[in-house]
Image (spheres, rainbow, N blue to C red):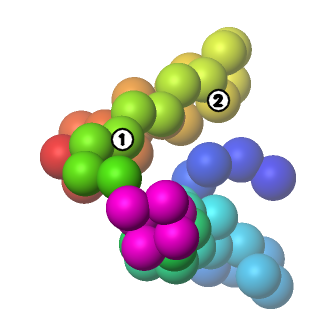
């Protein structure tokens, strides 16, 4: 699976889970105010896509 959402695949909403669930959980649990994500190769493309869609 990739960082992208794939509605045609069951449970294929990786980007939504990352943005709506994982990031809020990390911010709440670790009390951070700023975050960064990074990736290499295909995940680098995915992180860039997420960065532009959810600044």
Crowding at mark 2 (Cα within 10 Å: few <14, some 14-19, many 20+):
some
The verdict on residue 29 being magenta is yes
The verdict on residue 6 being magenta is no
Q: Which mark is residue 35?
A: 1
- Determine whether the residue tagged by mark 1 lies in a helix, strand or loop: loop
Residues shaded magenta: 26-31
Tell me what residue is drawn at x 57 percent, y 54 percent: 4
Marks 2, 1: nearer the viewer: 1
Query: Does residue 7 appear to the left or right of 35 in the view shown?
Result: right
Tell me what residue is drawn at x 35 percent, y 53 percent: 32
Question: Compared to 49, does 25 lie above or below?
Answer: below
Q: Which residue is mark 2?
A: 43
Magenta-highlighted stretch: main secondary structure? helix
Question: Compared to 34, does 31 lie above or below?
Answer: below
Toward the front, the furthest residue is 31
**Upstream in sequence: badge 2 or badge 1:** 1
């Amino acid at each position: 699976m990739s960082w992208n959402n794939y509605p045609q695949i069951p449970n294929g909403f990786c980007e939504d889970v990352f943005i709506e669930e994982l990031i809020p959980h990390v911010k709440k649990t670790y009390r951070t105010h700023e975050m960064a994500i990074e990736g290499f190769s295909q995940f680098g493309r995915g992180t860039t896509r997420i960065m532009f869609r959810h600044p």
